[in-house]
Image: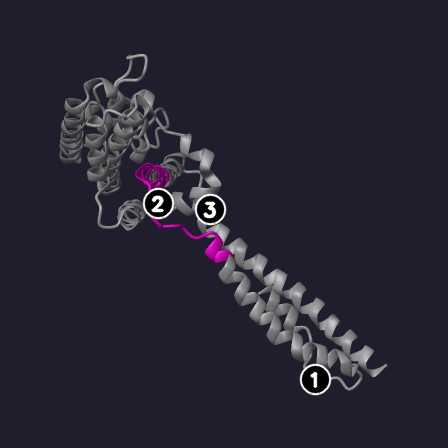
Amino acid sequence: MAMVYALASHRGPGLDSDEPEEEVIGRKYAFPLAIVFCIVAYVFFAWAFSQDYTKPCGDMAYFDKADSFDDYFDNRFNFFLSRWTLNEEPKVGRRSNKAMHKVLVDLVDQREADLKRLSGPDDRRYTALRRLYVLLHMESSTTDEIWSTAVSLIHAVGSNQTAELQRVIADFFLLQNYSSTKELTERIGKILNSYQLKADLVKNYLPEILYDKAGNCDYWTEYTQKHFPGVSSKCILVPPNATVITKIIHRMVHSHSTDCLDYSSWELFFSVHNIESVRMGLLLITLASSVVFYKLLKCAIARCVVKRRK
C-alpha cells in the first residue's frame, strides 16, 4: 500500500504542463524498474526465510536437522496451547473450541508432512536403528558415537509419541464435560504404554546406553517428561499416569489452569508464533525499499538527462 500510495501521488506525463521534461522521463523509466525490483526483492526474502527440506548427507546431520524440526513444531504447538490457557492473545483466545482444535490438528499434520518430506523414502527410526546396529558390531566405533546414535533413535521414537499425544490434546477442545474424558484417558495410556515398549526394545540392544553418564536417569523417561505437549515436566509423574495427565489437560483447556503450564515455548516467540507477522513485515520492507529505489532511480535518470543536454 505504501508503494501504491507513493507512486499514485505522482501525476503521469502530460497532466502537468509545468513539470520538467527530465522528471517525466525519469518517472517513465524508473517506474517499471521499481516494479521489477519489488518482485525480485520479495522473491529473495521469501526464499531466504523459507524452510529448508534438503536432507543432509550424513546420518547424524540428518538426525540433528530432524530434531530441530521437532523442536520447532513442539514449541509452536505449546505456544498456541499456552496462549489459549492464559487467554491473553485475542487472536487465539476469542476462537471457539472447535476452531482451536483445527489449529492444533493442522500443526500436527504439518509436522508429520514436513518430517516425511525431510526424511524422504527412508524411515527416521529405521535409519537410526541401522546405524546403531552397525556401530555395535564395529570394533572401531567409540562410546560417544554409540551414545549419540542411541539418543537419535530415542528422539525418533519420541517424535512419533509426541505427535500422537498432540492429537489427543487437540481433541480435548471438543469435549463437552469432564465425564467424557474416559476415552481420551485410555488413548493417552495406550500411547504411553506402546512407546514405552518401543523404548524397551532399544534397551535390549544396549541397556546401559539409556542412562545418563552418571547412571542416574532413564533417558526415555526424561525425554517423555520434557516433551509432553503443553505440560510442564514437573507435573509428569514417573511413570506417567494417564488419569492424572487427563485432569491436568482438562483444567488447562476448559478452566484455564496454569499450574502445570509449560512456558518454555515462549523463548521462541518470534520464530514459532510470528510467522505471519514476519511475512507481512518482509512485504512492507520490500514495498518501502521499492519506493526508495523508485525515487532514487528517478532522480538518477533525470540527472543523466540534464547532463546529456549540457
Where's residue 120, x and y in %? 26, 50
Q: Earlier in the sequence, mark 1 or mark 3?
A: 1
Characterize the magenta stretch by its predominant secondary structure.
Answer: helix
The answer to which image quadrant residue 13 occupies is: bottom right
Q: Earlier in the sequence, mark 1 or mark 2?
A: 1
Label 1: which secondary element: loop
Q: Are marks 2 and 3 in contact (CB under 8 Å)?
A: no
- For the residue pair 209 and 273, the one nearer the viewer reads as 209
State the residue position of label 2. Answer: 56
- Whole-number angstrom distance, CA of label 1 to CA of label 3: 43 Å
Q: Amino acid at mark 1?
A: Pro
For the view shown, which residue lies furthest in the right direction? 310
- Whole-number angstrom distance, CA of label 2 to CA of label 3: 27 Å
**What residue is rendered at 32% in x and 24% in y?**
144
State the residue position of label 3. Answer: 274
Where's residue 274, x and y in %? 46, 46
Where's residue 157, x and y in %? 22, 34
- Whole-number angstrom distance, CA of label 1 to CA of label 2: 55 Å
- For the residue pair 283 and 65, the one nearer the viewer reads as 65
Q: Amino acid at mark 2?
A: Pro
Which image quarter is the N terminus in? bottom right
State the residue position of label 1. Answer: 13
Q: Amino acid at mark 3?
A: Asn
Q: Nearer the viewer, mark 1 or mark 2?
A: 2
For the view shown, which residue lies furthest in the front direction? 140
Q: Earlier in the sequence, mark 2 or mark 3?
A: 2
Q: Which span of residues is magenta-colored?
A: 45-69
